[in-house]
Amino acid sequence: MVAMNTREVGALPSQKLMEYIKQGVFKNVKESQVSPASIDVTVSGEWYRVDGVFLPKTDETIPSLIERMNGHRHAVQGPLERGVVYVARLNETFSLPPAFY
């Protein structure tokens, strides 16, 4: 269980990030990916080209968001277009409590 102080705001220090990794809140994250206040994430081969910028709705799934944004699968080896928004699946998994949103 993740204990969070709701009065804390801002970036999380690396010690707190490591704590969340050990608790299973962040999965598939290696210690070498943790920086002082961030995690260096890696992208998988699953990319989608979507129409425009978006803000996910609370409890909205990624597949439904991609459908809502008229997303189409993008070949990773293909070029990225300037001014176009892409959504890529991460290799890491984050089970964030509602207070993170």
Image (cartoon, rainbow, N blue to C red):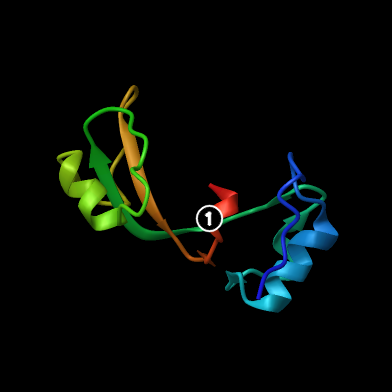
As drawn, 34 above or below 50: below
Residue appearing at x 16%, y 48% in the figure? 67
Residue appearing at x 76%, y 50% in the figure? 12
Q: Nearer the viewer, residue 47 or 81?
A: 47
Q: Amino acid at mark 1?
A: Pro
Q: Nearer the viewer, residue 27 or 80?
A: 27
Determine if residue 37 is in view.
Answer: yes
Residue appearing at x 25%, y 51% in the figure? 75
Tag count in the figure?
1
* Residue lying at the far top of the rendered structure: 83
* Side (left or right) of 32 relative to 64: right
Which residue is the site of mark 1? 98
Question: The N terminus appears in which quarter of the rendering?
Answer: bottom right
Image spot of residue 100 (x, y percent):
59, 51
Q: Nearer the viewer, residue 83 or 60?
A: 60
Determine if residue 80 is in view.
Answer: no
* Residue lying at the far front of the rendered structure: 6
Q: Label 1: state its secondary structure.
A: helix
Q: Quadrant of residue 4?
A: bottom right
Image spot of residue 15 (x, y percent):
84, 61
Q: Quadrant of residue 5?
A: bottom right
Q: Specify few, some or many for label 1: CA neighbours under 10 Å numbering under 14, 14-19, or 20 or more.
A: few
